[in-house]
Image (spheres, rainbow, N blue to C red):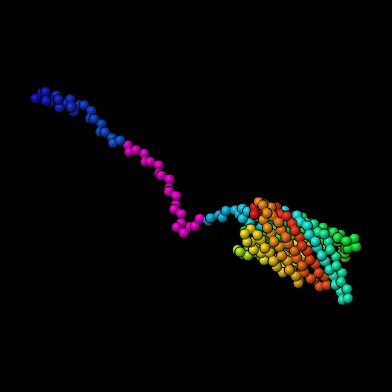
Amino acid sequence: MHALVLVVLLAAEAPAAAPQRPDPAPPAQAAAAPAPAPAPSGSVALAVPPPIADAERLLASEVTAGVGFLGSGYSQPGYRLGDAHFAPSLTGRYVFHGLTADGGVLFAVPVTADGTAFAFTASLRAGWTWRKWSLLAGAVLQVASGAQPALQVLPTLRLSADFGPVGATLGVVDVLGLVPAHLSFDMKVGGRRFSFGWAFPIGLLASLDLPVSGRWGLKVSGFAFKAFQSEFAMVTVAGTFGAER
């Protein structure tokens, strides 16, 4: 009895064990970054077309050197005058990423001592060339001693288009300023390019471009037209160097 009471008293005097506290909950994890919003279902990505290579453009860089004969005539009731000129020429065209420039010079040298005086013409144009179109504009300088006026500066324009098997060219004060205006059509068959058209006001012009070897070619061209009391005609044979043929 006494032993039991002693055990009970000892148990009462012993401090009660502190209740165990639950472990603190782990800190909440950082909220995940919000997912990017999905692209609208109706959005369409814009495709950027690739740049046009110079080889794919309508015009190409080229140099042409030729010799020709230019004939001119003037008629009045009761008489007719005529002259012939030896006409060397040099023309060139440069295409750089579409930006295009062309120009040339022609010398008209009389073939007889009693013929008309020496004449000179030069042109310079600039513009742009696309795959199917080209537009060039500039000025032509003409100098002829003995003429009235002796010096002229005229505007010049050339618009070309490719319609597949056939192309078209509209020129104003074209062919180094010798043709007032023309509308011509050209086509390419087996590497040979033919051109034929109307020269203003009453006349024709034509050309034939033949490949020779690699980047070399041969071009034969000519025109003839009548303007009021004046008549003009020219035939030129030229060598060309430019794009691969």
Q: Where is residue 132 in the image (x, y as percent from the top left)?
A: 62, 61
Compared with 96, 140 (above or below) is: below
Instruction: Give the farthest residue toward the front.
Output: 212
Instruction: Give the farthest residue toward the right.
Output: 114
Q: Can residue 156 be seen in this view?
A: no
Q: Which of 1 and 236 is in front in this view?
A: 236
Q: Which residue shows up at 11% across the image and 25% down it? A: 4
Quadrant of the drawing holding the C terminus: bottom right
Inspect the magenta stretch and tell me whether residue 83 lies in it: no
Q: Main secondary structure of the magenta part?
A: loop
Q: Where is residue 88 in the image (x, y as percent from the top left)?
A: 80, 57
Q: Where is residue 175 in the image (x, y as percent from the top left)?
A: 75, 62
Q: Which residue shows up at 53% across the image and 56% down it? A: 46
Q: Nearer the viewer, residue 108 or 60?
A: 108
Q: Position of residue 145 (x, y in %)?
A: 88, 61
Q: Is residue 73 visible?
A: yes
Quadrant of the drawing holding the N terminus: top left
Q: Which residue shows up at 37% across the image and 41% down it? A: 28
Left or right placement of residue 194 versus residue 228 in this view: left
Left or right placement of residue 81 versus residue 123 in this view: right
What segment is highlighted magenta in the picture?
A: 24-45
Instruction: Give the farthest residue toward the left.
Output: 1
Q: Which of 132 and 48 is in front in this view?
A: 132
- Report which quarter residue 106 is drawn in: bottom right
Inspect the magenta stretch and tell me whether residue 28 lies in it: yes
Left or right placement of residue 152 versus residue 17 in this view: right
Q: Which residue shows up at 67% across the image and 66% down it? A: 185
- Report which quarter residue 230 is drawn in: bottom right
